[in-house]
Amino acid sequence: MAMAVIWTVMVGAAILCGLATGRADAVAAAALEGAGAGVELCLSMAGALCLWMGVMEVMRRGGLARGLSRLLRPVLGRLYPDFAREGEVMDAVSANVSANLLGLGNAATPLGLEAARRMARRSPGVASDSLCMLVVCNTASIQLIPATVASLRAAAGCQTPFDILPAVWLTSALSVTAGILAAKLLARVWR
Amino acid sequence: MELAMAMVVPGLMLGVSLWGLARKVDLWGALTDGAGEGLKVCVGIAPALICLLTAVYMLRASGALELLGEVLEPALTAVGIPPETVGLLLVRPVSGSAALGVGAELMAAYGPDSPVGRTAAVMLGSTETTFYTVAVYFGAAKIARTRYAIPAALCADLVGFLAAGWAVRLLFG
């Protein structure tokens, strides 16, 4: 639904603006040009994306992902104190976080949803503090290697697509911290 | 430093492969299965990307984005975010593929190593599609009262955007 509104507003605004600035021809031509650019973009990203998903799959099957989970348990127990003693919930959350760290969005989502469903059993229909925290942590990106963005940069002709890594890590850390702080703070005042 | 950064990725590839071999993983099978998944992701995001790039191109051609950028420019400049990224800020929490499209456009227009291109890349790499995630999680858990989840998540996004502008200036001058 949200996308339908956004799409309509974008196209509508483009036409109105184009008419107002006398660029209506350019707007019409840009529509077809944009559609073609979408296909080109997908093709130019495909190689890097496939390579990385392949490497991630090796990490998962080699047990690196499970090792990460064990490593994360102490931290996650503090973020989700209500469920720290429930092994199944914490397993799912740990796996979700490690998949997020590895940038495996497709793997992270089903694991996170598993954790969310288990958390929701205690308070049906209402988001508990832990569930809010889980959602906030999943809306903030924590991936260590942003492969999609790097492939996008490479596709744009960048020679060193990974030189943004330190900036991404710094930004991710600040953003996740802000989300966690906001959630912890709001948990006290929002009933 | 630059050589080290350049070796992170190939090094990771080799390291993971050696680890996989040591753990007796079917290395080739895992690599190709994962690559197949990557292809599925590409096919999955292609329709949205094509439709949204159409709208983005139309908006760009019409001059509407420059107009919006001019309106928001003083505020964005004041907090250290390149005003050219305004379209990305607006679309990022709503659609991941649309944000990728806008980001790709910025990189093509300003260059991937320009401050604008780098800030856009950092923004893309350090934030998520907030509204999509919220919808999927609360939908799966059958939650009607979402309480403070959305405000807290948007707070993280906002700090992420601010930090992206700041981190690029800090690390790339």
Image (spheres, coloured by chain):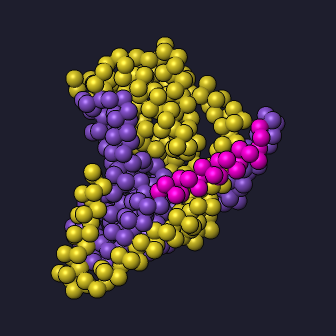
Q: Quadrant of the C terminus of chain A?
A: top left
Q: Is residue A26 left or right of residue A148?
A: left
Q: Residue at x 45, y 74 (%)?
A: A36
Most common SS among magenta residues: helix
Task: Say which colour chain B has.
Answer: purple
Q: Position of residue B60 (x, y in %)?
A: 33, 74
Q: Position of residue A136 (x, y in %)?
A: 38, 36
A187 to A103, vertically: above or below: above
A178 to B47, vertically: above or below: above
Q: Is residue A172 visible?
A: yes
Q: Residue at x 30, y 55 (%)?
A: A3
Task: Say which colour chain A has.
Answer: yellow
Q: Residue at x 77, y 40 (%)?
A: B26
Q: Is residue B23 left or right of residue A114?
A: right
Segment colored magenta: B25-45
Q: Is residue B26 magenta?
A: yes
Numbered-mark total: 0
Q: Position of residue B111 (x, y in %)?
A: 49, 72
Camera-side residue of B7 and A62 = A62
Q: Is residue A52 visible?
A: no
Q: Residue at x 56, y 43 (%)?
A: A104
Q: Position of residue B142 (x, y in %)?
A: 32, 29
B163 to A136, vertically: above or below: below
Report which quarter residue A34 is drawn in: bottom left
Camera-side residue of A79 and A27 = A27
Q: Is residue A183 magenta?
A: no
Specify the farthest residue to the top.
Answer: A85
